[in-house]
Amino acid sequence: MTSGQTPLASLAFLSPKELLALESAGFVTVADLLTHFPKRYEDRRQFDNFPNLPTGKPVCLHGGVIDAGTKGFGKTRFYEAVIMDGSGGVFGSGKITCRWFNMPFMSKVIAAGQQVIAYGKVKEQGGRLIIDHPEIEIVSDDGEETIHLNRIVPIYKNISGLNQRRLREIIHSVAADCILHADQNPLPFPFSVSVNNRTEDLFETHFPTSAESSKSARRRFALESFFTLQLNVVWQRTRHLSQNGRVLGKKTTLLKAFYESLPFDLTGAQKRSIKEIIADMRAPRPMNRLLQGDVGSGKTFVALASMLLAIDSGADAALMAPTQILAEQHFLTFRKWLEPLGVNLVLRTAIWRRGLQPLSSTQPEPQAPTIFIGTHALLYDETLFTDLGLVVIDEQHKFGVAQRAALIRQGTLPDVLVMTATPIPRSLTMTIYGDLDVSLLDEKPAGRGKIVTALRTKPKQQDITDFVKAQLAEGRQAYLVYPLVEESDSVKAESATEAFPKWQKRLGAGNVGLIHGKLRPEEKDAVMEDFRSGKTKALVATTVIEVGVDVPNANLMILHHAERFGLAQIHQLRGRIGRGEHKSYCILLTDSKIPEAIEKLNILEKSSDGFEIAEADLRLRGPGDILGTAQSGLTDLRFADFITDTELIREARSLADQVFREDPDLTGIYANLRPFINESTAPQGAH
Ligand code: ADP
Ligand code: MG
C-alpha cells in the first residue's frame, strides 16, 4: 500500500531506466504521477469503423499492419505503415496509411504483422486515405487486456523514454495501490465536491468506469486546482490592498482642460472606466486595475486621462508599450492632445537610447511632473523618474511578470493600470486576473465604419489586386499581411519579403511599404511614418502590426494564408482597420482544404465580438497557446476542458472568499491551507 508521499524510487516494479525517465520528467512521488491526468480517453470497448472518406474528426482504429517501410526521397522521407481493418475490407476502403515524417525511429517500433490502435484524422492524398502522425499503440497478447483494451482507456501526454502502454501500466499499478484517505487529502478542502471519496475519484480519472464518472472525477480535481489558484489570488489581493498607497487625482484641472479640447465625446464606457480609476487613485491604497477592452475600444484615452490626473497631483506617470512602433504611436497621440495643455512628455525607446533623433521629444523641465512613454527601455534608466506615481502597461500580456514588476518598483507603491486588448474570455479573467479590479470598455466609439470580413478559399490574384486598387483609388490604404518574414524551407507559404516586389509591380513601387520584425527599429519607424502620413498606400506586413497600430484611413486588410494565424490573432490584426469612418474590409485568403481550418475562419466571418472569438480560440487551442508562456499560474492547470467552465471558476472563487472571510490570515480554522499559498508566484497584478 502506498500513499501520495511514497517516493517513486521505492516502487519495486519500476526498472532503473523507467525511474530515470519519470524523474527526468519531474515525477518524484506517487502523487506527482497520479496527478499526471490523461489528456484524453479512448473508448476501446468499441472502435470506429475504417472510414472510406476523409474524416473531420479524429478516429480510433483497430487493425493489423500489412506493410511498413521507409518511403519518399530526398528531403522528404517518411516511415509508412499500411493498416487494415480486422474484417479485411476491400481495396481503398479497408486500408489506411499511417505516415511519420522525420521520425526514423518509427521503423524500430512499427512492423508488418502487428496489431495496432491508431488515432488521428484521416485525409485523402493521391487516391489513398492517410493519417499523418497518428498516435499509435501496439496491441499485444500479454494478458494486460484489462488495462489497455475493452474499456475506456486513458491517453497521457508523452513522457520521454516511456511508451504510452508502459506508462499506463505504471499509473494503473500505482493508482490501484494508493489510498488517499480523506484525512490525508493533500488539499484539505473545507467542502465536499463529489459523491466519491478522493481515492475513488483519482482512480476514476485514470481508469473510468463510464464517461460520466470520468467527468465528475475530473471536475473534482479541476475544482481543487482552481480553488488553490483562487486562494492565492485572494490572498495576494488582500495583502496588496492593505498597503498604504498614495492619494492622487484630487486635482482635475488638466483633465477638464483635456476634455474640453476633445472634438468628440468619450464613450459611456470610457467615462465609467475613468471614474473607476479616479476612485482608485484617490483611495489611500495602491490601485491595481485591469482595463480590458476589445481592439479599437479607446483604451488609449483612458490611459491618457489617468496619467493627466497623476501629473496634476505632482507625480510622474509612465506608459510602457510592448513594441517600438506602438510606443511611438502613443507618443504621437499624446503629443497631439497634450502639447496644447503644456504637459511635459518624454519618449523612451531603443532608438532614443542609442542617441538617434527620436521622433521628437519635449525635454522636461527638471523636476516637473512628466508623462513618460516608452518600451522596455523605460526599465533600464534608473534616473528617469523623480516620483513615479502611476504606471500604465499597455498590451500587458506581452510582458513578463518580471518586466511589469521592474517598472512598478521604480515608484513607491504606485497606482497601476494594466491594459489588454487580447479579449480574454471571462472565465479566464477571473482565473488569471482575479487579483485585479476590472474596468471594461464594452462600447465602441461612435462613427465607426463597419468591418466586413470575408473568407475566400480559392483566391484569384487578379480579383484581389483589382479590389486593392479600387480602395486605393478611393483614397484609402491597405494592409497586406503575410505569415512569414522570409521564404522558408519547411513552411509552404508566401512570405512578406517575397510578396513585396510583386505588390510593388501591381500597385506602383512608390506606393508600397514593407514592414516586419527583422527590420532595424529606425527602419520600422520610417516605414510606419510613410504609411501613417499616406506617402505609401499599401503596407506589406507580418504580424508586427498586430498590436496597437492606429491608421484610421486604412480600411482594407488582406490576410494571406489565413489558416496559419490563430483566431484571436486575426481578430487583433483585424482591429487595425475599421478605425475610421469608412467601411472596412478584412479578406481572409486560404488554400487550405482542411475542414477545421475553414470552420475556424468561418467564426471570424460571423463574429466581431472579441470575447466570443476568444472563447472559440480557447476551445480550439487551449489556454497555453492563447496566453503565451509569460502567463504564470496557468501552467498548473491541467484541465483545459474546464477552463471555459465559468461556473466552476466562480465556485472556486466564492469558496476562497468564504475561507478568507472566516479566517483572514489562515492562522485559525484554515491554517492547514496556509502551505498552499505560494508567495513567490504572485499572480498578474502589481506585485
Ligand atoms: P484601443 O487601444 O482600445 O484598441 P485606441 O485607444 O487606439 O483603441 O482607439 C482607437 C481609435 O478610436 C483611435 O483612433 C482613437 O483616436 C479613437 N477614439 C478613441 N476614443 C474615441 C471616442 N470616444 N470617440 C471617437 N473616437 C475615439
Ligand atoms: Mg491600444
Image (tube, rainbow, N blue to C red):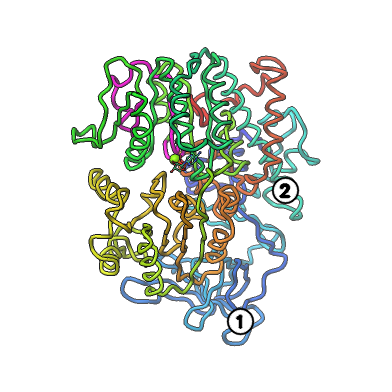
Q: Is residue 217 above or below residue 342?
A: below
Q: At numbered mark 2, what does the secondary structure look like: helix, strand or loop?
A: helix
Could you tell whether 660 is left or right of 539 in the image?
right
Name the image quarter holding residue 331.
top left
Give the amino acid type for the residue marked by disc 1 in the picture: Gly
Queried on whether the Cβ of the residue with tag 1 lies below 8 angstroms from ligand 1, the answer reads: no
Task: List x then y, in percent, for residue 50.
Answer: 63, 76
Q: Earlier in the sequence, mark 1 or mark 2?
A: 1
Q: Residue farthest to the right?
A: 195
Task: List x then y, in percent, for residue 491.
Answer: 37, 64
Q: At numbered mark 1, what does the secondary structure look like: helix, strand or loop?
A: loop
Task: List x then y, in percent, for residue 180.
Answer: 71, 35
Q: Quadrant of ligand 2?
A: top left
Does 391 lie within the magenta span? yes
Q: Residue at x 42, y 59 (%)?
A: 556
Q: Is residue 655 above or below residue 625?
A: above
Queried on whether the Cβ of the residue with tag 2 lies below 8 angstroms from ligand 1, the answer reads: no
The residue nearer to you, when weighing 277 against 410, is 277
The CA span between labels 1 and 2 is: 35 Å
The residue nearer to you, when weighing 545 against 338, is 338
- Residue 19 visible to an observer of this rendering: no
Could you tell whether 363 is left or right of 237 in the image?
left
**Residues in magenta, as a range:** 371-399
Q: Residue at x 19, y 35 (%)?
A: 357
- Residue marked by disc 2: 204
- Quadrant containing the N terminus is top right
Mark drawn on residue 94: 1
The residue nearer to you, when weighing 433 against 65, is 433
Give the amino acid type for the residue marked by disc 2 in the picture: Glu
Does 223 lie within the magenta span? no
